Image: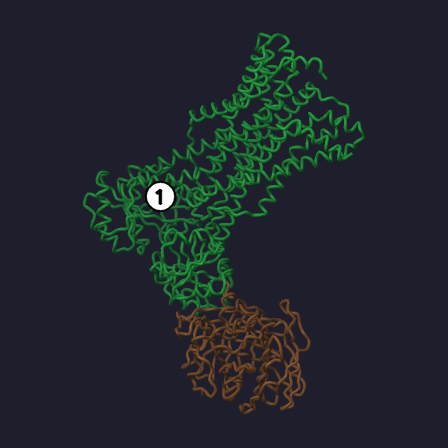
Chain colours: A brown, B green
Amino acid sequence: MNAKALFLALAPFPAQAQGFANLGTSIEGYALPQPGTAFTFPQDHGAHPAFRIEWWYVTANLTGPDGTPYGLQWTLFRSALAPDSAPTSQVWMAHAAVTTPDAHHVAERLARGGPGQAGVTADPFEAWIDEWRLMGDNLETATLSAQGPDWGYDMTLTAQGPIVLQGDQGYSVKSEDGQASHYYSQPFFAVTGTLHLPDGDIPVTGNAWLDREWSSQPLADRQTGWDWFSLSFASGEKLMAFRLRADEGAPFTAATWIAPDGTPTPFPTGAFTATPGDTTTVADREIPTEWRVQLPDRALDATVTALNPQAWMETSVPYWEGPVTVTGSHEGTGYLEMTGY
Amino acid sequence: MTRAGLHALLSHWRRHPLQLFTLLAGLALATALWSGVQAINTEARASYAQAADTLGEGRLTRLLPPEGATIPEATWVALRRAGWLASPLVEGRLGPARLLGIDPLTTPVQTGPIEEADTADLQAFLAPQGALLGREDTLAALPDTGATPIPSPDAAPGTVLTDITTAQRLLGLDGFTSLLLAPDQPRRQTPLAQVAPTLRLQPPDQSTDPAALTDSFHLNITAFGLLSFAVGLFIVHGAVGLAFEQRRPTVRTLRALGMPLRALIALMALELALLALLAGALGLLLGYLIAAALLPDVAGTLRGLYGAEVAGTLTFRPLWALSGLAIALAGTAVAAASALRRLATTPLLAGGTRRAGARWAARRARTQGLVGAALLLLSLALGLWGGGLVGGFATLGTLMIGGALLLPLLLDRVLALGQHLARNPLPQWIWADARSELPGLSLALMALLLAMAANVGVSTMVSSFRQTFTGFLDQRLAPELYVGVSTPAQAEALLAALPGTVRALPIASVDRPLAGLPAEVQILRDDPTYRENWRFLSAAPDPWDQLAAGQGVLVNEQLARRAGLAVGDPLAVTDALTLPILGIYGDYGNAVGQAILTEPLFRDAFPEVVPLSFGLRLPPADVPALAESLTTDLGLDPARVVNQSNLKAISLGIFERTFAVTAALNVLTLAVAGFALLMSLLTLASIRLPQLAPVWALGTRRATLGRLELLRAVGLSALTALAALPLGLALAWVLLAVVNVEAFGWRLPMFLFPLDWLRLLALALLAAALAALWPAIRLARVPPSLLLKVFSDER
């Protein structure tokens, strides 16, 4: 079966031609994000099947006993086939990856909703597909695991700070035409656990970042892909910033500056800029794996460099995602996702 | 110069249109038969590949439920959540088609039809009413289901692909019939015994791959294609040789005019290449027609014999056309090589006298005869000690070629003997003349020998098979009525409703490997039906009593041969049950091994299997009434109440189709050989006047000469036919005792059909007479002035 064809039709991702993976298609019958919607937890940790697409997205920057940097990704996507909110109308997709300085392991799983092969429950919290899972009490602490044929990971996450609402109280605008999503993060997870690599197990520690987002059509038709940054600085401050590229005209950007106590400051389009630098040939494409990021309001002018430029996610909908290091006005680590290349 | 040379060379064909026709027709026929067979094989292989794409059978490990059960959805989910990358399958029949339900999200198999389907189709695939993907002809034959039909030309023939939920709805099934395991499993899994202890792993098994099973069938028809091609090449060789011989004066003139030998040879090769391309194109067209005509029968054969689905319609493939043209060119090159070499090496002024040619031919016949005899010896050795299917076909090949090569020498010896015994001048001349004509005819006669021997051999095999098979059907299909039901409750109701005078024999089997081979275990109730009708190939004393006492099992010939088992050997039927073999029975038409357990043992070993089919014994007169009451009173499906004579007719129908292709190719090969003979006689007749003129001058009438021509052709053909008989019987023996055993796993007794031989002999003589008639009539009417001119023109 070609999950690719299927997910090009259904996936919560923008596609090459008409928005990466058809995010720009019709949304008749689905709920639309409304500004001023207040989140309630733990309910909002669970699924919102009235919306067409949704994801639970964990990335982590990790360090081994010898100081070697690693990164991991755990992502569960929900995509509705019909706006009836029925479990059998949902299709689930998950990606997991481990990135080392010289290797990148990827696996993908797909599932239909209904039988229980994949799903999300809010209380107690569990998000799973097959044997991969993210589970824990109200997301204060959680365990995270995934595996492939010769690699895997088992992690414990402990929240060290509050949940952060992105955009306007969790209403995150994605284009000048007003497309938007509901979006919150938990960027303050401390992580300990074990990476299972083909050469053996490695104990690691670090910090993880959870993104939760749901919507029905977050991209405008002419938007072709995005560059997404989640950066943690040595100062304890954090930055979430994205840049949505369009067929023509300037990219649409948005950013949230997060204080060490979790207080978010959103910035409108244009405040944050990201300029592509050196590119790397990855999977027959030229991909910028070095960026100059600037947010003059916070005196940020730094270079973001991929830990492993070959962090290509060879999945149904391929994209680049991997850990990065930050140097310049601010020092730190983070994750970078680039789609639509 | 080149232009003039080519013009001069080509003018030969304008003056000898018959030769041109011979050359083109021979090559076209050879190419046609060869490429026709190739087209059939290619089509069949493409079908297997598509089937393999759809099913992944034989290449992926499966998880199977206990016999007669399905795998609950919850078990599948539990496996997935325990780290098992398993994907559910739901398999069943929907009308005439095989319905295959898959989970497109988890299936590890690459399925062409879905990969190429567009996104709207995929949405429909997962939608509640579902979608059915298949070939248009397959979809058209389906009952109305409410699902969206999506035509997909790449789908496997006879298979309809759908989502598991749609398949469950259409088949009325809960759960899944099996789970496919992805080849790359995750690094950490909960052991199967903890998650799903009732499921068992079925490792990938190459022998369920239809391509492997049907190889023997394809080898069979490929051999026929090659044989036809060889016969065709005989024709081309003859025509090219004759044309070169006749153009000797032209060549001499051209070279005297200053044309270099190299350029001349190049020109003649170019000329032949053009003719070969023309004939090859014609042959491709013919071959395509032959293949299109035979393919439905081939598809029927493969379905009947191996259960492999093959499309009944032909697709044009450019690669096939190219290879057909290439083989036409290569064949021409082979056929013309010796003529070109002679042209290159013969001195410029050497005259091609017939006497010299005859001496050369006699030497060649002796060498050929020696090679032929050596090949026959090799064939004998291969037949006795060679192994495997390839060994069997090598035996066949050496036998046929050896026999053909030996033929001219054999005929020459017989004719020499006749000449020696003849007393009067005219009969002496007739024998001597026939001998001197032999080299010119020997190629055609060799072609005739091959075709006739193949005919004798194959028809002996098919007839022996038919005789064995019908006898076997009479043994096996003894019950007067066969009844099938769908549920155990229906089975109970059926048995309760049967009158006391009717004996019901349960029919059930379980697929399970025996001695490491794919096989099935069958139930058998102790009943006079079996004791009276079954014949064993070999058996212990009192096999039925011992079987009924549970002291052993019966196995079919296929299992015994493949596993090297003999009567008395132990066979593990289940992990807990090992029994000695009591008897080996013939089981023609079955692709897998089989073991038979007596009913009580079977029910103990496989308690979950409830027989749902029965053979009913009752007086034949009562059959219609009982069949009627079963369908009307019990509401059984009339399609599943089958009387014995219908079943026999169906089985024989499958059998006849199995050999329809072989028979058709056989007839075509014989026709090509007859054509070769006609062409050889025609070309010889035109150059025979110098031999005949003196005989005419000595007082023999032209009509007599014509009759003698006819007699000679028929006599030579009769001799060839006599030689073909032992060769054909040897061929039949190899087919029955070597090739069939390797290909199908059973050995058939050989029956002889002398009436068939007489018919074939008559046919061969008729063909020879027909072929000789026209040349003979032409000779009888040749103007005396032409005969007289021979003396003035003598070269």
Residue projecting furthest to the right: B258
Which image quarter: residue B26? top right
Q: Nearer the viewer, residue A270 or B16?
A: B16
Quarter of the rendering occupied by the N terminus of chain B: top right
- Vertically, is B203 above or below B740? below
Q: Is residue B2 left or right of residue B548?
A: right
Horizontal and vertical percent for residue B572? 39, 50
Which image quarter: residue A117? bottom left
Horizontal and vertical percent for residue B230? 58, 34
Q: Is residue B478 left or right of residue B283?
A: left
Residue drawn 67% across the image and 12% down it: B788
- For residue A67, say whether it is visible: no
Horizontal and vertical percent for residue B235? 60, 30
Q: Nearer the viewer, residue A200 or B238?
A: B238
Which image quarter: residue B692? top right
Horizontal and vertical percent for residue B369? 61, 25
- Residue beneath disc 1: B554
Quarter of the rendering occupied by the C terminus of chain B: top right
Residue drawn 35% across the image and 43% down it: B554
Residue drawn 66% across the image and 82% down it: A292
- For residue B539, say whether it is visible: yes
Q: Is residue B456 left or right of residue A282?
A: left
Q: Is residue A122 left or right of residue B385?
A: left
- Circle 1 Cα neighbour tier, 10 Å, few/some/many (<14 / 14–19 / ≥20): many
Residue type pointed to by label 1 = Leu
Q: Nearer the viewer, residue A141 or B771?
A: B771
